[in-house]
């Protein structure tokens, strides 16, 4: 087994880390306080090539492997979860479904602008009563002549209501199967379509400078050719999309944990009590040792999942494991980091406070930790 990254991947890691340190770190706290989506850093991330990382150059992408994309998300998350979320959601949930399931015409229409960051795209899956039970979607789409008529709503959708959001992929109930289960299909809806409205959500605990939206569809009519892939294939498309998305959430957990560890190590070496750095007390040294150990195991698991995906091998089980483990590793590291900072860890002037808040979504978004355990249990034959 070769654990070395390629020269290209090392260069990518260094360039994204340098960018995050220079362009994001100094403004992340203020953006968080103001719940402000930064179009400036969004454009700079696009210029760095962080959108369409795994998309073929034919459609304007970077043509890299999936592990390279995951490394980029990891390095952004090491500095700020909100910026990492913008990139992760745009690639995995926005660009991914169109790239993997779209027609040639749909790819050529939407991907070039998405890959250069000129536009953003959302993935409308979650509803108020369809979270973990995603197949329980109540949003409907009825074919009327050569148009789909969509009615319903979605919630907690990333990148769907910015000034540059071009549209959203919507999971809809398009009929009933012979076995009585709902027929689910994905349909592309462009921003500005009559009957479609996207509204930003505020008052979030975490990822406060990323864009989160509620979507409303009221007799929203779109052309029949906006169907993504075959009719009734929406659930399959959703599951494949979430498998890839879990790797990007895992990368956010890994990068966030790394950021927590580095902040905790630095602070504990500088902070003195009883005439010596607090890192020299065994109780604190062991916290740091545990953080380093968990981060190393998380990286190995996530990179294995990426290797499986890039090799064309089955990776669904390992993706669920990586998402679960990396999320919980960040939970542990953020908790230790705040503890090592003491009272200062509770103050917004210290970045560790933001990391502590941001980590919670990783145990909820794109499949809760409970759902990941369910997925793993099914893969190993326990259920």
Image (tube, grey):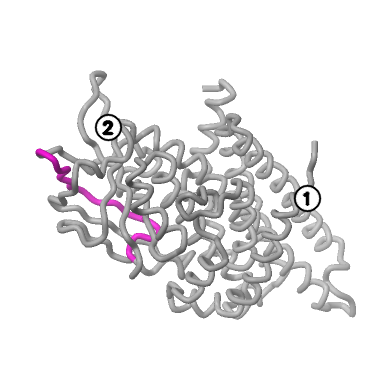
Circles 1, 2 touching at the beta carbon (< 8 Å): no
Whether residue 336 appears in magenta in the rendering, the answer is: no
Q: Name the residue under label 2.
A: 231
Q: Which residue is drawn at 63% across and 42% down?
A: 306
Question: Which element carries disc 1, helix, strand or loop?
Answer: helix
Q: At 24% from the left edge and 23% from the top edge, which residue is drawn?
A: 177
| Label 1 Cα crowd, 10 Å radius (few <14 / some 14-19 / many 20+) | few
For the residue carrying disc 2, how many other residues have a C-alpha within 10 Å: few (<14), some (14-19), or many (20+)?
some
**Nearer-the-camera pick, 325 or 176:** 176
Name the secondary structure under disc 2. loop
Residue 308 occupies quadrant: top right
In the displayed structure, does residue 301 sit left or right of residue 277? left
Q: Residue 293 carries which label?
A: 1
Left/right of residue 118 with respect to residue 303 in the rendered view: left
Where does residue 371 sit, x and y in percent of width and height? 49, 38
Q: Which range of residues does the magenta coloring cover? A: 145-161
**Is 156 one of the magenta-colored residues?**
yes
Left or right: residue 280 versus residue 101 is right
Can you tell which of label 1 and label 2 is closer to the viewer? 2
Q: Which of 252 and 342 is in front in this view?
A: 252
Give the answer, above or below, for where 314 lies relative to 101: above
Q: Position of residue 211 (x, y in %)?
A: 40, 65
């Amino acid at each position: 087994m070769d654990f070395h990254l390629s020269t290209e991947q090392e260069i990518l890691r260094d360039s994204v880390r340098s960018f995050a340190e220079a362009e994001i770190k100094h403004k992340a706290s203020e953006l968080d306080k103001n719940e402000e989506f930064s179009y400036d850093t969004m454009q700079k991330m696009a210029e760095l090539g962080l959108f369409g990382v795994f998309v073929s150059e034919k459609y304007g992408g970077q043509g890299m492997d999936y592990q390279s994309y995951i490394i980029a998300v990891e390095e952004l998350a090491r500095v700020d979860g909100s910026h990492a979320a913008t990139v992760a959601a745009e690639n995995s949930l926005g660009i991914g479904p169109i790239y993997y399931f779209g027609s040639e015409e749909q790819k050529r229409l939407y991907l070039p602008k998405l890959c250069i960051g000129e536009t953003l795209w959302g993935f409308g899956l979650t509803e108020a009563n369809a979270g973990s039970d995603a197949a329980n979607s109540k949003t409907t789409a009825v074919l009327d002549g050569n148009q789909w008529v969509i009615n319903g709503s979605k919630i907690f959708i990333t990148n769907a209501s910015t000034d540059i959001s071009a549209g959203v992929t919507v999971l809809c109930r398009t009929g009933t199967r012979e076995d009585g289960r709902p027929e689910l299909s994905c349909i592309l809806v462009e921003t500005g379509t009559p009957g479609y409205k996207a509204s930003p959500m505020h008052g979030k605990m975490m990822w406060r400078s990323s864009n989160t939206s509620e979507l409303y569809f009221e007799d929203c009519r779109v052309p029949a050719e906006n169907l993504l892939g075959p009719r009734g294939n929406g659930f399959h498309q959703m599951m494949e999309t979430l498998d890839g998305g879990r790797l990007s959430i895992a990368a956010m957990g890994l990068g966030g944990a790394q950021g927590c560890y580095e902040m905790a190590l630095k602070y504990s070496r500088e902070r003195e009590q009883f005439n010596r750095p607090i890192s020299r007390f065994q109780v604190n040294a062991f916290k740091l040792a545990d953080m380093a150990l968990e981060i190393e195991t998380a990286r190995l698991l996530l990179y294995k999942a990426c290797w499986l995906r890039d090799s064309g091998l089955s990776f669904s089980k390992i993706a669920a494991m990586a998402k679960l483990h990396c999320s919980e590793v960040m939970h542990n590291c953020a908790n230790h980091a705040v503890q090592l900072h003491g009272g200062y860890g509770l103050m917004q002037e210290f970045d560790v406070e933001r990391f502590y808040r941001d980590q919670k979504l990783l145990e909820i978004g794109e499949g809760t930790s409970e759902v990941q355990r369910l997925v793993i249990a099914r893969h190993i034959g326990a259920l």
